[in-house]
Image (cartoon, rainbow, N blue to C red):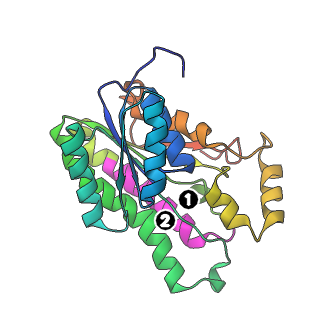
């Protein structure tokens, strides 16, 4: 980010799953642009390490434990953010989890976990944060879905369904909340270089190679590639943008 540009000065951003990977990159970018950032993650120790690094860089950040599968945990996180920083202006729903396998080989236990983290987690955090955004006269919600939710993905049937659900849920919220000056948008990553991706692909190295070849830009995405799109949607530059889906995938999907 160019020096001196602080589009988010004075804003408070709560980013879920922000301890590492895409979430950490998003939180770092928002902090660099002037936001006070809440690093909300189920991994408390890793979240604290991320906050330490941000503070060392001169940013303002707070770590807290958040289990997105629990509405009570989401409500508590938003309440603590309000106590520590005065409120929440930006919610980034980033927390996610997946397991790559054919649907007929998957189990109800896996379905429940994928749905609880990827879809219900977004519902919980939105329900917790929206009253805060309304009380502050507006704000931004950016949810991380996936191109899997737009076009499907082999071995990710339930995950794809959850991500498609996020898109429909967000478009409806965008309609409902426009009168409150709350913008709701979605960013859809393509395959991105994270520990989660490598964990999913550990037993499928050929799939990962084929994935790279199928991307027109011939590389996996990097967490920082997503951070820029989120920062734009969280900023005043996107004040007239709502209900939109931005694919950040190196050209992997180009459908309208």
Q: Is residue 192 above or below residue 55?
A: below
Q: How many numbered badges does the structure rendering display?
A: 2
Q: Secondary structure at mark 2?
A: helix
Q: Does the stretch in magenta take in 248?
A: no
Quadrant of the image for the C terminus?
top right
Magenta residue span: 154-173
Q: Residue furthest top?
A: 4
The residue identified by callout 2 is 162
**Residue 171, percent from left and from top:** 39, 50
Question: Disc 2 vs disc 1: Cβ atoms closer than 8 Å?
Answer: yes
133 relative position to 98: left or right? left
229 relative position to 44: left or right? right
The answer, for residue 30, to whether it is visible in the render is no
* Quadrant of the rendered image containing residue 228: top right
Q: Nearer the viewer, residue 132 or 31?
A: 31
Q: Secondary structure at mark 1?
A: helix
Prevailing secondary structure class for the magenta stretch in the rendered image: helix
Q: Residues within 10 Å of mark 2 (few under 14, many from 20)?
A: many
Q: Residues within 10 Å of mark 1 (few under 14, many from 20)?
A: many
Quadrant of the image for the N terminus?
top right
The answer, for residue 173, to whether it is visible in the render is yes
The residue at 35%/28% (across/down) is 239
Circle number at residue 149: 1
36 relative position to 214: left or right? left
Q: Does the stretch in magenta take in 170?
A: yes
Circle number at residue 220: none
Q: CA distance from mark 2 to mark 1?
A: 7 Å
């Amino acid at each position: 980010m160019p020096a001196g540009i602080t589009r988010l000065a004075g804003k408070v951003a709560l980013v879920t799953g922000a301890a590492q990977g895409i979430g950490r990159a998003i939180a770092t970018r928002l902090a660099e642009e002037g936001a006070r950032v809440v690093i909300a993650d189920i991994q408390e120790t890793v979240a604290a390490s991320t906050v330490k690094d941000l503070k060392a860089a001169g940013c303002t950040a707070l770590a807290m434990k958040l289990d997105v599968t629990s509405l009570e945990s989401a409500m508590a996180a938003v309440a603590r953010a309000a106590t520590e920083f005065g409120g929440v202006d930006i919610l980034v729903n980033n927390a996610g989890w997946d397991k790559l396998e054919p649907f007929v080989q998957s189990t109800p236990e896996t379905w429940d976990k994928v749905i609880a983290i990827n879809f219900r987690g977004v519902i919980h955090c939105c329900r917790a944060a929206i009253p805060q955004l309304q009380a502050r006269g507006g704000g931004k919600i950016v949810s991380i879905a996936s191109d899997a939710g737009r076009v499907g993905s082999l071995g990710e049937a339930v995950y794809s369904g959850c991500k498609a659900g996020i898109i429909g849920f967000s478009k409806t919220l965008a309609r409902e909340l426009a009168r409150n000056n709350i913008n709701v948008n979605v960013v859809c990553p393509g395959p991105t270089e994270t520990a989660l991706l490598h964990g999913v692909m550990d037993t499928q190295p050929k799939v990962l190679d084929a994935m790279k070849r199928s991307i027109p830009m011939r590389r996996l995405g990097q967490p920082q590639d997503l951070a820029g799109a989120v920062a734009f949607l969280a900023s005043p530059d996107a004040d007239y943008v709502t209900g939109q889906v931005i694919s950040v995938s190196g050209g992997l999907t180009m459908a309208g």
